[in-house]
Amino acid sequence: MFQLLTRRDFVRMAGLTAGVAATSQLLLACMATTTDVLSTAAPTDVQPTSPPTKAADQQRALQVVFPKGFLWGVATSAYQIEGAANVDGRGESVWDRFSHTPGRVLNGDTGDVADDHYHRFEQDFDLMQQLGVQTYRFSIAWPRIVPTGAGAVNQQGIDFYKRLVEAMLKRDIQPMATLFHWDLPQALQDLGGWESRDTAQRFAEYADTVYRALGDQVKLWLTLNEPKTVVDVGYILGIHAPGVQDRTRAYTALHHMLLGHGLAVQAFRAANISDGKIGAAMNVSPVYPIDDTPAAQAAAVIQDGLENRLYLDPMIHGYYPADMLEHIGDLGLKAAIQPGDLATINQPLDILGINYYNPIYVAPGPQIAQAPHEYSAASWQPMYAQGMYDMLTRIKRDYGDLPLYITENGAPFDDELNADHQVDDQRRVRFLYDHFAAAQRAISDGVNLQGYYVWSFMDNFEWAEGYNQRWGIIYVDYATLERVPKQSALWYSEVIKNNGLGDPPAKR
Ligand code: FCB
């Protein structure tokens, strides 16, 4: 039943915003065997076919230039690409359990095989290198490292990530590791998951193991990815793992995730990683009232609390916003807070990751309203690049001058392989152009933005959407697992090479 409703339908029903949509679109491609041979596009596919002429150079005069040293990257997460679900001692995660539960994921898709990146990472990094990608944000699967969530460490899991990081470094691709991108060990979920305070402690122990194994080589770290999505979509709407629909449980989990973040940052300091930097990846959205009535404006303030302040204030300022404590009332949050917790959560951060996808428009309620913008193929994503600028400048104003990274930004479209075996995704090129330009305007206006990770490197398992939504700049043919760079990948490669943007692409 979930698949028949859009994320916005859910949002309206729930009266709040959510993370990732379920839609009624049909599956575009299906999964196949793991035995197919990868046919990665030849390097020539990502290079200009003829040497640029002077006229072509002039035509390509940069309109938008980024600071020297700006890092251009791509992002993924473990469950969405790795596959190899039962390989080398990996334990079960909540997403294995959830995706194998009938009715939870569109078309019954699972991450069992996904992009089979576990076995194909060398070729994937070749492709990244050919595109000129400078940094790669990936996540570590907790159940590969600590299969039962506590206690015994699985050396094979550690070895896999060591090989992965070495393969990146060999190609001059700087790793950025996320410790928790939603794939909690199921064994911990069975003990209460994030509703249990102990899980925060288990998270810090697991993080410590990973720092000590990879800290020599990985210098950029993120604790949590999007705690808001776990709260809203996993625990209130119930369309993500663990599939709960209960606000009290949601806000209990919220507090313990933030506590886990604080403890994991403390463990990072204790591990003393030389040159290591740590933060979290937070999905933020600017919230605009649908009109200038006082009721809509008041609704926007509450919604802004639920979208942004409820997460950033405790992490960065050390308090929950008073209006949010009142709004949430007795639903879990206050009861979960113990003396000293906010000081633990409020650790000094070296960097902050911003996942930016969409603005939110609200009517009184608060109710999410239709946005006055074009939407991507995700029913929850109105496309509005100025919203990124608004958030970046606001974060600097309200949360200080932390070095920021866009740790995710991108959009899904109905990409298809054409007769020439190419994917002409000009709408994605336009989307990225507009957002890169907005990021550069923020930099010009003083925001300390140091890098940008496009979501995603390749099409992958998009949670409740399964393989239906294609977010990659690389197309994945799920029948063969072949990777085909889309036009956006070729265009991005030029952006990286120039550290800037030429003329805006024509609007399509
Ligand atoms: C974000 C998630 C990421 C992906 C994108 C589309 O919310 O962090 O894993 O699903 O949305």
Image (spheres, helix red, strand yellow):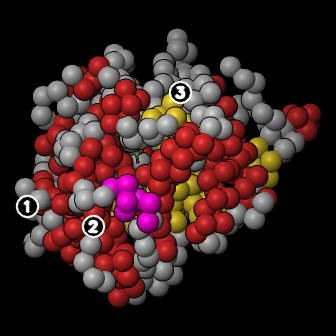
Q: Do the residues labelled 3 and 2 touch (CB within 8 Å)?
A: no
Q: Which amino acid does label 2 sit on?
A: Lys
Q: Which residues lie in the magenta part? A: 322-328
Dot 3 alpha-carbon crowd within 10 angstroms: few under 14, some 14 to 19, many 20 or more: some
**Residue in view at x 47 percent, y 85 percent:** 274
Q: Which residue is drawn at 52% across and 66% down?
A: 352
Along the line of sight, the residue nearer the viewer: 425 or 234:
234
Q: In which quarter of the image is the C terminus?
A: top right
Gap in Å between the C-alphas at discs 3 and 1?
40 Å
Report the side of 238 relative to 135 (left or right): left
Q: Is mark 2 within 8 Å of ligand 1?
A: no
Task: Give the spatial CA distance, label 2 vs label 1.
Answer: 21 Å
Q: In this view, does 502 lie to the left or right of 273?
A: right
Quadrant for residue 281, please give it. Answer: bottom left
**Crowding near the residue tagged with mark 2, few <14, some 14–19, many ≥20 C-alpha atoms within 10 Å:** some
As shown in the figure, which amino acid type bears the numbered disc 3?
A: Gln
Q: Any mark on residue 370, and which?
A: 3
**First-in-chain label (2 vs 1):** 1
Q: Where is residue 170 in the image (x, y as percent from the top left)?
A: 48, 63
Three-letter amino acid code of the residue under disc 1:
Leu
User: In the figure, 334 relative to 265: above or below?
Assistant: above
Q: Position of residue 269 (x, y in %)?
A: 39, 85
Please check the rendered image and state whether residue 223 is part of the magenta-colored stretch, yes or no.
no
Q: Position of residue 11 (x, y in %)?
A: 38, 34
Looking at the picture, does residue 460 appear above or below residue 258?
above
Q: Is mark 2 on a helix, strand or loop?
A: helix
Q: Nearer the viewer, residue 116 or 381?
A: 381
| For discs 2 and 1, the disc positioned in front in the rendered view | 2
Q: Main secondary structure of the magenta part?
A: helix
Residue visible at 36% across and 77% down in the picture: 342
Q: Mark 1 points at which residue?
A: 191
Identify the residue position indicated by label 2 in the image: 334
